[in-house]
Amino acid sequence: MASEEHLKIFPKSSRLRVVKPFDPWRSPLCTCPMKWVVHPYTGCAHGCVYCYASNYIPKHSIPRPKKDLVSSILKDLRVLPRGILVELSTSSDPYTYPENDLKLTRRVLQILLESDMRVLITTKSVFILRDLDILSKFRDRVAIAITVTTPSDALSHVLEPGAPPSSERLKAMEILSKHGIAVTLRLDPIIPMVNDDYNEIQSLIKAAARAGALQVTTSMYKAKPLDFRRVYAVTKLLRGSNAAENLKHLYYGDAKSTTIEGYRYLQEGLRLSYVKLVKEVAESEGLAFATCREGFAHLHTPGIACDGSSYTYNLNSSEPMPTSFPPKV
């Protein structure tokens, strides 16, 4: 369903088929600008151990294309105004493996950009490079957020077994940047005792800066029972039983940890210390900084959207950014 905010500004939002208003459970911590989202595929083959979408999408590890996607988007575009921000995607990767043959994401991308929409792509896949021709042509209205959670290819294979190695994602970032396409790093989630080593975080951000990233967006792992079982098992495998039990205590035993919108959050002080660490390194490399659903918007670089979508706008003009979601009441 469309949120009240979307319906207030665009009353026809309730009639949309596949271009859906982004409304993340009306989270009081979400600072995303107003945007819409398209999922060319349901499910994702990356197999990330921390994946939140696996909690509510059946057979999430088996990606399948949305039925009648292209025709539905063309119908939706008759209702939507030009120039809005559309993201590909939030609960799946738009370049998951069926895209190699089906080319649905490529077709959707082309339709959206030729219809004067702004597009934010969030991905772990290097297959995005196939679409360099489209991305380069419309570079002024495109931003790419590439998720990399560790500089270690070995660790990324454990955490994200179906995704390309970290080194390949950083190389894709460099290629996109050299083509004049705005690229940001999503360093999220950070999982205590798994990918929270300071030296590795510093190494990753430095590598992203060298590759041409403009911004770092970070967040801490937020637990739900299904994904926490996987994260617990991986922590035990990588760091031992004591570390796994410590992780469990941090999320489920610490009296200062809390539940927000169904997710278990680390205690605020601990989250803040991690976030400040990333901010310090990012800013030392000249990168903009933001967080995702942490409640620390005061730490964000002024004028920069948390999701990296600012770069789909001319930041030197007087053109306004979209309205952000209001706090939940």
Image (cartoon, rainbow, N blue to C red):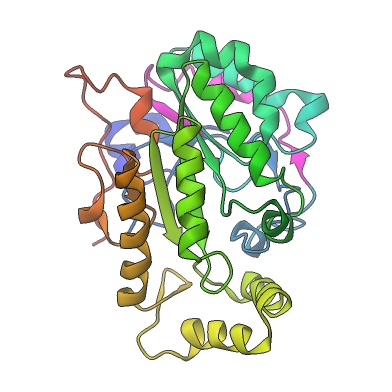
Decide whether residue 73 is among the magenta residues.
Answer: yes
Q: x, y (%) of residue 130?
A: 69, 20
Front in this rendered view, residue 264 or 328 = 264
The image position of residue 217, as x and y in percent, is 41, 47
Tally of numbered tags: 0
Question: What range of the chain is rendered magenta?
Answer: 63-87
Image quadrant where residue 272 sits = bottom left
Q: Is residue 137 left or right of residue 126?
A: left
Q: Is residue 4 above or below residue 47?
A: above
Indicate left or right for 64 with 283 as reference: right
Whether residue 266 is situated above or below residue 183 in the rendered picture: below
Task: Tell me which corner region of the image, top left, top right, bottom left or bottom right, holds residue 319.
Answer: top left
Quick check: is 157 in the magenta stretch? no
User: Which of 68/191 is in front?
Assistant: 191
User: Image height check: is 281 above or below 68?
Assistant: below
Quarter of the image with the C terminus is bottom left
Q: Position of residue 264 (x, y in %)?
A: 47, 75
Relative depth, front residue between 315 and 33: 315
Front residue (pair 222, 214): 214
At a point 62% along the width and 89% down the height, the residue shown is: 242
Residue drawn at the location 53% of the way across and 12% of the way down: 136
The x and y percentages for residue 74 are: 58, 18
Q: Which residue is at 65% across, 75% downward? A: 235
Picture residue at 37% right of the left edge, 19% below the top: 81
- Asked whether residue 15 is in view, the answer is no
- Asked if residue 235 can be seen in this view, the reply is yes
User: Which of the 4 image quadrants contains residue 79?
Assistant: top left
- Above or below: residue 317 compared with residue 123: above
